[in-house]
Image (cartoon, rainbow, N blue to C red):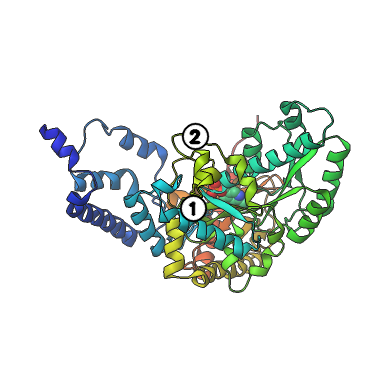
Amino acid sequence: MSSIDTAARAHLFNAGSLGRYRDVLARGVDRVARRVGAADRPFTGVTPEALAPVVGAIDLDRPLGDTDAALDELHDVWLRDAVYFHHPRYLAHLNCPVVIPALLGEAVLSAVNSSLDTWDQSVGATLMERRLIEWTAGRIGLGATADGVFTSGGTQSNLQAMLLAREEAYRRVVGGAAARPARPEVLARLRVVTSAAGHFSVQKAAKLLGLSADAVLTVPTDADRRMRTDELARTIDRCRRDGQVVMAVVATAGTTDFGTIDPLPEIADICTAAGVWMHVDAAYGCGLLVSPTRRHLLDGIERAASVTVDYHKSFFQPVSSSALLVRDGRVLRHATWHADYLNPARAVEQGIPNQVDKSIQTTRRFDACKLWLTLRIMGPDAVGALFDQVVDLAAEAWRLFDADPRFEVAAPSQLSTVVFRHLPPGADPNLVDEANLHAREALAASGAALVAGTKVDGAHWLKLTLLNPETTVDDIAHVRDLIADHAAWYARTAATAELSCPVG
Ligand SMILES: *Cc1c(COP(=O)(O)O)cnc(C)c1O
């Protein structure tokens, strides 16, 4: 064996390299710990222009050969300027700080590297994932026939839900037709109904599933940003009159912007009466499943045909960790394909549990390991308590903005977002949008805090997504004042610039 062969083999993880394994991983852990310990802001404010040349200059064909040198380089290209979600002034998107039991799970699962497609690549891991699916379905209340599978995220969970709903709708249409219609003809008539505040992954799923460009119908929301059920009923009636087939209603349990929960019991009634598949997108609101005080906010979810949960949003899990749950496990067969080399039909007869039969992925991470260790070390009540704390915090933050004459605030969240904009008395209406956009950018550039932005009825608003129980009301008050200063500065400067800039 040549010396390069020997050197290459030394990097393989096996019984002969355990010293290196322990040492290298410990160095990585130490780097992260040092960086997190030093992070006095959630972000350094680095720009793509500054960082791209540093990343671009690295010659990927010339290895550094040395772990510490590679970690130094990693620091320069990433760790130094990364956005730190554990920081109490990270208030932007649906990124949670992660719990240590899940980090332990992440380290273990990637070393063992089980693949959840077949039993013969996973063994106990498959049974553990199945128990967690059962446990989640039990928390939802889906009943004895429920099943599901872990996925890479809410987008994939929603896509698979729409795939299953499409196939069930297709079967119904074809089953009831006198002459068998062509498949494209049926697909063109399928519709999905969601609210105007639903997630865009529903539109993407419709596109991927070959539905028509106008397949997703969005019904308006009420003043609280929840789906209007009278409009839902009207939309379903109109589809029926127009010869269209509503293949699914997607209710959102925790809208991404407003943290509001669609009226699930009423939507379930409408879906039952119309014989329509009800999907609940609880990517955000799933944390309520373990909330010691707020589980009732999800009442009605138990009547869904399918449910999306994102453990990587409100269960404090590292990305990726999500699942799709279905009331009737048999519908998962629409994701089944038997390959001779992997999961022959014979395996089903032999009772071999192959999760690939239920998934749209083949090789698949054992993400369930993270949730398993979280439940076994912390327990569900502790996870729910963390989520409860951020929901309480959001209510306080909402009152803070509502009481402040410099700000206008949107309907209060049922979860943990706060949507607001800087709108002081006498503000120039032409500058309000720009001032708010500027405030968000200036804040990010300083790195002092990160907030998100969105549009409300066509105007630019700002948004806090609170998922960190360590964030305090003082943090929020401080960030609020920074935003007010940035926005006021912009309005003042722009007004002066207009005055001093002669027209014509
Ligand atoms: C985040 C989100 C999704 C998408 O989930 P990913 O895990 O980011 O793919 C879907 N629906 C809702 C309501 C979300 O908030």
In the image, the residue with mark 2 has its CB under 8 Å from the nearest atom of ligand 1: no
Q: Would you say 249 lies left or right of 450 here?
A: right
Considering only vertical position in the picture, is 183 above or below 347?
A: above
Residue 414 badge: none
Q: Would you say 464 lies left or right of 458 here?
A: left
Q: Which residue is pictured at 66% across the width and 52% down the height?
A: 328
* Residue identified by numbered label 2: 339
Amino acid found under the numbered disc labelled 2 = Ala
Foreground of the two, 201 or 381: 381
Amino acid found under the numbered disc labelled 1 = Ser
- The answer to the question of whether label 2 and label 1 lie on touching residues, with beta carbons closer than 8 A, is no
Picture quarter with the C terminus: top right
Q: Which residue is pictured at 39% across the width and 64% down the height?
A: 101
Query: What percent of the width, then of the height, locates residue 3?
Result: 10, 34
Query: What percent of the width, then of the height, locates residue 182?
Result: 75, 25
* Residue identified by numbered label 1: 321
